[in-house]
Amino acid sequence: MAVWCHRCYRSFRTYQALYQHYRDSVHHHECPDCDFDGEFRDELLDHFRKEGCRTHRLSHKSAKCECLGCCRMFKTYGGMIIHLETGACVSGIDRFDVYETVAECRRWPDYIDQNFYEEILCRTDLEDYNYTEKVYPFNCSTCQQTFSKLSSLFQHVESPSCGQTLDKGSILVLRRFLRDRLDRY
């Protein structure tokens, strides 16, 4: 089944390829907070100013986080994890690799709901599993908020909404474990 980019008049074999095109194309500037997609970067910046999307602050940050699988730089650790979860990394690392590695960390109970531990360790696709509702296998050990993706947990930790930070406690242990296990996979 082919999918189509109407702006660029191109077809793609999969939705993943289309989404990668959106991320990498100079003709797509998407807002991560809503469904806005500007053809030019100036349109995206105008959108941020008009709508007040929280990521406007991120657009002015310099890239400081290098991918664990390739040399690509990201503005946030959560952004880098999204890159891996989508399978867009040239290293071939995908969400199954990342999630299994998290489950292998000795501090896994700090970030994984025990009800999903075995499924994650066995690389079960929780998005396609026979659950009647969306699942939230990841959690913040500081405030107990739950998340459907690991990247969402990291974005939460990077935000001011939680007392947890990337450089302390169990999140730091997890970041080091991921670095040691996945770095240049």
Image (cartoon, rainbow, N blue to C red):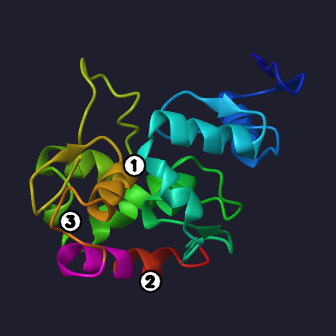
Local secondary structure at mark 3: helix
Q: How far apart are marks 2 and 3 (CA)?
A: 16 Å
Residue 97 on image: x %, y %: 47, 59
Q: Which circle, 1 or 3, is nearer the viewer?
A: 3
Q: Type of residue at label 3?
A: Trp
111, 155: nearer the viewer: 155
Residue at mark 1 to residue at mark 2: CA–CA distance: 20 Å
Q: Where is residue 116 in the image (x, y as percent from the top left)?
A: 21, 45
Report the residue marked by disc 3: 108
Going from the N terminus, do you reach mark 1 or mark 2 first? 1
Residue at screen point 19% across, 45% down: 146
Q: Mark 2 points at which residue?
A: 180
> Could you tell me the amino acid type at mark 1?
Arg
Residue at coordinates 15% horizontally, 64% vertically from top-left?
110
The answer to whether residue 26 is above or below residue 68 is above
Answer above or below: position of 80 versus 170.
above
